[in-house]
Amino acid sequence: MMHRILSTFIFTAIALPFIACSDSEIQSSDIPQITQSIFIVPETYRKDPYPAFKTSDKFYVNVNEKIRICGGYFINGEYATAEEAMPYYNTHKWTIDNYEASATSVYYSFEKPGIFDIEFETVDHLGDSLISKAQVYVSTPETITLQSPANNYNQIDGENVNGVVLSWSLSGIDPWETATCILYANHDRLAVWRSPLGEVDCAKPVYLLGTLDADSTVFKRPVDYTVDISTIYWSIQAEIKNEKGLSEHAFSEVFNFSTKLKNNGKAIVEIPVSCKFNQYPEKSLLTGTFISAAGDTLSKISGIKSNTTVNQTFDPQSNIKFVVCDSIRTEFGCATTTFDLAPSTKTTLDTLFLLDKTKPNMVPVRTELPTASKIQFSILDNGAGVNVSKIQAFMNNDSLQIKFDDYTLSFINSCKKECKLVITAEDYAHNKAPDVYWIVKVNGSETKISGPYARLEEE
């Protein structure tokens, strides 16, 4: 729900001389006349509330909205700052929904909806009281829930002879609020909120009438209704007004439904397939199999790249399984999804991601080498690929300057005798290389590398 912009309010008490009624000398015309007001401002507002905030006898806020409730004084009709008013009173007290405080301002938020009383009492040096009262209307958060057709429903008749029933629910309207709803719909997902169809009753479903089949102007190409479906995106906006005429807006999600194909009952499925975090999609080679509920092979695919869409046509049936594997970037393994196909429908599934769950592999290029040579390690990952920015090397806890090229990490041998070498690495799928270390031993002109050894948690 959009957060309500806190409007400006003041509740002003009846102007009364802030004096003791029994004292004739205090009632003299030269005694200052004092009145007080209750202000509600946003929590972040730090200036004096007057004159930016106007008079009102009711306040409207949202549940958990952070506000500052503060009192203000007027001396002979002129606003007085907190410091200017101090000589004229002894104490003041707030009572907010049975909560009491003695500060000039109270930071507050209401945790539940309803109507709450506020009382601001000021006592002067003679013990007389001035009391101001107000009410705060705390609104329930509004929510619009689209109900029918179900999101992604794909069995609507494109000619739409009887109309499509669109239904939703609007919750959170308080007794002091009224709501007006607007229906939006378009064939273009991005244009929905720019396409109002008109005002509708928030509490009643509506019939969407007229043909739903999009023409070539929508597709921007010739249309073949045996393979092309028309998708309609729709949403609801509600304007909620309170008794003061102040309004806010609530917005639904955007749902969609699609028309049926005009064919012999065959069903089409489209499955976007991607190797997640793959830095080399052109190097992937996917193979897949469609399997019926009875376990029979319906169709096979091969030779497709990552980040493509698989398109197949079948007889309508339930519980079709699709298994796809990467035969080249083998660390991505396989992924599976199951779906149903109704007659004359075209179903587009969510993207099916193959996931790399394998850690990068790390081995020294040579375990024995001339001391003057650079130390080299191969860091291999046959999945998402090694993330160069995550590679680090430490010799006896000292960071080393490294170079990584063509899967090979190299750095100068800085060890003098025996050193502990730690290399950290990670692939783009966030799999970290094994947490190990290596021992580098230098003996004159020769260097030997042994390991790997498991690192203890405290190391």
Image (cartoon, grey):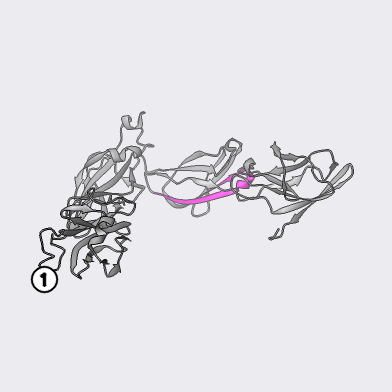
Q: Is residue 170 visible?
A: no
Q: Give percent across and percent down for residue 418.
A: 83, 50
Q: Give percent across and percent down for residue 86.
A: 26, 60
Is 51 placed left or right of 303 in the picture?
Answer: left
The kind of residue on which mark 1 rests is: Ser
Is 191 placed left or right of 286 in the picture?
Answer: left
Report the number of numbered marks: 1
Q: Over which residues does the magenta segment extend?
A: 323-341
Residue 346 falls within the magenta-colored stretch: no
Name which quarter of the figure residue 228 lies in.
top left
**Residue identified by numbered label 1:** 22
Q: Give percent across and percent down for residue 408.
A: 72, 39
Q: Is residue 61 above or below residue 369?
A: below
Residue occupying the point 88% across, 43% down: 446
* Direction front: furthest residue: 25
128 vs 286, nearest the viewer: 128
Label 1 crowding class (10 Å Cα cut-off): few <14, some 14-19, many 20+?
few
383 vs 395, nearest the viewer: 395
Q: Is residue 341 visible?
A: yes
Residue 334 falls within the magenta-colored stretch: yes
Q: Give percent across and percent down for residue 223.
A: 35, 31
Residue occupying the point 20% across, 62% down: 135
